[in-house]
Image (spheres, grey):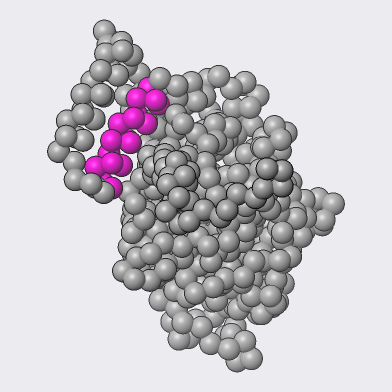
Amino acid sequence: MSGHVKPTRNRREFVTEAFCGFGSLAMAGMLQAADPLAPHGAGANAKAKSVVFLFMAGGPSHMETFDPKPLLNKLDGQKRPAEFGEAKYQFVSADAKLLGTKRTFRKYGKSGIEVSDLLPHTAECVDDMAIIRSVHGDMVVHSAAQYQLFTGRILPGFPSMGSWLLYGLGTESKSLPGYVVMPDPKGALEAGQPMYSNGFLPAVYQPTHFRPGAKPVLNLDLPAGVTREDRMRTLDLIKGLDRADMRPGDEELEARIGAYDLAFRMQSEAPETFDLSKESEQTRQMYGIGDPITDDYGRRLLLTRRLIEKGVRFICPVSGGGPGNMQWDAHEDIEENHLRMAAQTDKPIAAFLKDLKQRGLLDSTLVVWGGEFGRSPESQGSKGRDHHNLGFTMWMAGGGIKGGQVVGATDEIGLRAIEDPYHLRDVHTTILNQLGLNQDALSFLHQGRRERLTEVRGKVISQVV
């Protein structure tokens, strides 16, 4: 009859009729589990899609790069005045004297930010950069400081920020790794591969390490006489054999199977990405390719731009590798070391920033520059500087960052961050923020505890966003 209202269903009827809906939810979960690298998780306020960390391994000196200290020059050769406080070092002796800098600074851009003559090309981009002069960390030894820079902890075994971002967001690239490390060809670093690793996160979030040199990935081309169909049949056979003897939840084997799939897709689609001859001669020269000094780092940054175009989530091109002086680790002679290291990177970095900007990619790419710490105001020996974690410089550009500004300050000799000091975990929090990720929500249950990149809690560097 008209106006009849159907009685409320009982619980059994509701569950029976809703069964298909529950099935759909389960299927959605299975599909997500089947492809943990599928794009997901970006917040509504995300400004950036990808991150490039320009890691200056060994610890570049803030006093020689982005943080001018006139008083340090005036006090050159004198003991540090007591009012500046104490600092712990590895190699600076108790009777060490302050060391002035031979570098000169001048103002650049509309913002008038002072930058050292070591970096004249990078200085042209200051209006796009937020220079943070008040970063500090907890450790003064390379390995522990490198772990903290990448993972937020001073010990190995924790996931790097690249793995966290891949876990939180997935990757937009189907034919390339989502997280790439490009080591310096001169050798390994003190913290080794653990600083880049996925730690306790599933193996699928581990980085891919490219090789140095003209061929970052070997065997991209199919062997002579092998067709794409042949390779697909081989891959299907390997996957079938793996899965026939696979235990449920075997993340390592699942990641290995995924690596085979990725390798096949790379052979099919990626060779063109790695072919830098596709770029114009003007672009190659802009990056310094062909010049023995800048060729290596220029190639890696030009490849980085091409990977960004393909949707790779996190890329770390490393400057510095091998024993001490082959990094930004200027214990013996700050002038010789930094002149050499800056010459290798300055022109390529400027080209990279300008190239991203002219292609409309800088807005969606967060670029971060820095090392695991800075250098000491005191001299080590007569011409070098020791490690220094109490105050140093990093900068950010693109990805929603407000450029053309300096944030924070160290004291008048560069010893300690005294104005708006920011810990390395605050740098991590700001990176997450620009990608639309909440530091509390981005967590992983490990040994009964919800672990996060930012450990206890970081704060967003509000001036730069």
Q: Where is residue 169 in the image (x, y as percent from the top left)?
A: 52, 48
Q: Give the range drawn in magenta.
A: 251-267
Seen in the image, is 420 located left or right of residue 317?
Answer: right
Quick one: which residue is furthest to the front in this view? 1
Q: Main secondary structure of the magenta part?
A: helix
| View extreme (left): residue | 245
168 or 280: nearer the viewer: 168
Q: Does the magenta stretch include residue 252?
A: yes
Q: Which of 95 and 323 is in front in this view?
A: 323
| 225, above or below 212, in the image | above
Residue at image coords 37%, 39%: 34
Name of the residue lying farthest toward the bottom: 82
Camera-side residue of 299 and 90: 299
Q: How many marks?
A: 0
Q: Can I make out residue 354 in this image?
A: no
Residue reaching furthest to the top: 225
Residue 422 drawn at (x, y percent): 61, 72
Q: Which residue is drawn at 18% across and 41% down?
A: 246
The image quadrant of residue 33 is: top left
Q: In this view, does 78 lie above or below 52?
A: below
The residue shown at (50%, 67%) is 454
Answer whether residue 387 is magenta in the image. Answer: no
Q: Please tell me whether residue 386 is drawn above or below residue 327 in the rendered image.
A: below
Q: Quadrant of the N terminus?
A: top right
Q: 98 left or right of 316?
A: right
Q: Residue at x 58, y 61 (%)?
A: 438
**In x, y percent, where is residue 429?**
58, 64
Indicate the quadrant containing the C terminus: top left, top right, bottom left or bottom right: bottom right
Q: Can residue 9 be seen in this view?
A: yes
